[in-house]
Image: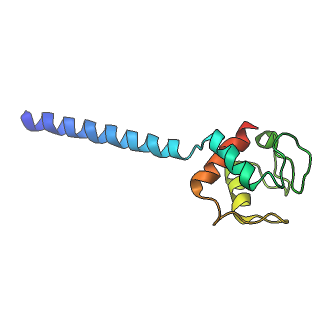
Amino acid sequence: MRKSTSFVLFCALAFAGASLYGQGKAAAGKGDVAKGKGVFDQNCSVCHNSDSTDVKMGPGLKGLFKRAKLTGGAALNEASVRAKVDAGGNGMPAYKDILSDAEKNDVIAYLKSL
């Protein structure tokens, strides 16, 4: 009986640990809106408006995640926005090696708040 109790306790702790690990990973990918605004202001605001849809050098990004498609026609979702940030194009520099994954998560969180 003692082995059964120990085994059940071990399984419960292992399950709880795995659940907490999964929650930590999910939370890590969400990004921080305030940090994202800072990254946007330093890297993106030269070419993009955040407070309107008016074109600066690049398209205005207010309400970006309410649109159906990116300017180039790709479906608009987090993955396509991240791909655009990474690859650049049409005069936009590639930020793949300039911004960290955390900074990209923060920028995407900020863009979702616009």
For this orientation, the residue located farthest to the left is 1
Q: In terms of depth relative to the viewer, which is nearer, 16 or 42?
A: 42
| Figure check: 17 above or below 101 | above
Q: Picture coordinates of residue 73 (x, y %)?
A: 84, 55
Residue under the image location 26 percent in, 38 percent down: 13
Between 42 and 100, the residue placed more toward the observer is 42
Lateral position of residue 65 relative to residue 4, left or right: right
Q: Is residue 77 left or right of residue 106?
A: right
Q: Is residue 58 visible?
A: yes
> Where's the C terminus, which quadrant?
top right
Q: How many marks?
A: 0
Q: Is residue 12 shown left or right of residue 114? A: left
Pick the quarter of the image with the N terminus. Answer: top left
- Picture coordinates of residue 23, whole percent (x, y): 45, 40
The residue at the point 83 percent across, 51 percent down is 48
Residue 108 visible within the image: no
Provide residue 89's location: percent of width, then percent of height.
Answer: 80, 66
Query: Colour scheme of this structure image?
Result: rainbow
Residue 53 lies, in percent from the top left, at 89, 43
The residue lying at 70 percent from left, 44 percent from top is 37
Please report the residue visible at 76 percent of the width from the left and 42 percent of the height from the top: 65
